Image (cartoon, grey):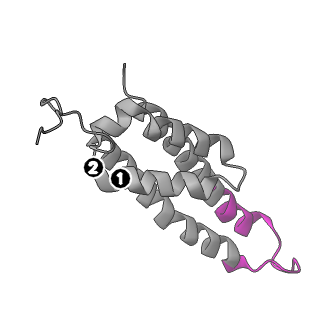
Amino acid sequence: MKSKVHLAILAIRISTVIYALLAMVFIILTFVLPTDTEGWSPFMGYFMAAILVPFIVFLEILITALRKRSFWAWIAGLIVAAMYAPSLFLPLGIMIFIGLLSNESRNEFGVGNKTTTQASTPESH
């Protein structure tokens, strides 16, 4: 069977695009909303975008590492999927879990049962 890592990569890419669009919306809001809006500072949009940018960069690095089949990326991908589970990103989290936890994908990352070439035989005493 074929590995399903591409499914996890697609889900992470979709979330990266959503975060980038959200950062742009925050920046645009700083120009659109009047400065006397209660509860909204002109710098709040920049601050929110600045919080999202490091996460976007991390997700892009994660995608690159998943393509290279790095073990740390497999672990980080599962952590990202677990973070998405209790949020609106639940469908993306499920896609990541399916992509990374399939037997073929786990074998590509060196996780799970290793098949041995020697048959196990009980020793006679």
* Image location of residue 68, percent across then percent down: 26, 43
101 displayed left or right of 37: left
- Are the residues flagged by discs 1 and 2 in contact, CB closer than 8 Å? yes
Q: Is residue 35 magenta?
A: yes
107, 26: nearer the viewer: 107
Tell me the amino acid under the disc marked 2. Answer: Ser
At a point 32% along the width and 56% down the height, the residue shown is 72
Q: Is residue 11 visible?
A: no
Labels in figure, total: 2
At a point 44% along the width and 40% down the height, the residue shown is 100
102 displayed left or right of 43: left
18, 65: nearer the viewer: 65
Crowding near the residue tagged with mark 1, few <14, some 14–19, many ≥20 C-alpha atoms within 10 Å: some
Q: Is residue 104 magenta?
A: no
* Image location of residue 82, percent across then percent down: 57, 55
Tell me the amino acid under the disc marked 1. Answer: Ala
Magenta highlight range: 24-43
Q: Residue furthest top?
A: 1
Q: Is residue 62 visible?
A: yes
24 displayed left or right of 40: left
At a point 66% along the width and 40% down the height, the residue shown is 91
Vertical arrangement, residue 70 with respect to residue 122, above or below = below
Q: Residue furthest front?
A: 125
Say the numbered circle drawn on residue 21.
Answer: none
State the quadrant of the C terminus. Answer: top left
Say the numbered circle drawn on residue 70.
Answer: 2
Name the residue that disc number 1 marks.
73
Q: Quadrant of residue 24?
A: bottom right
At a point 77% along the width and 63% down the height, the residue shown is 32
25, 12: nearer the viewer: 12
* Image location of residue 124, percent across then percent down: 12, 38
State the quadrant of the N terminus. Answer: top left
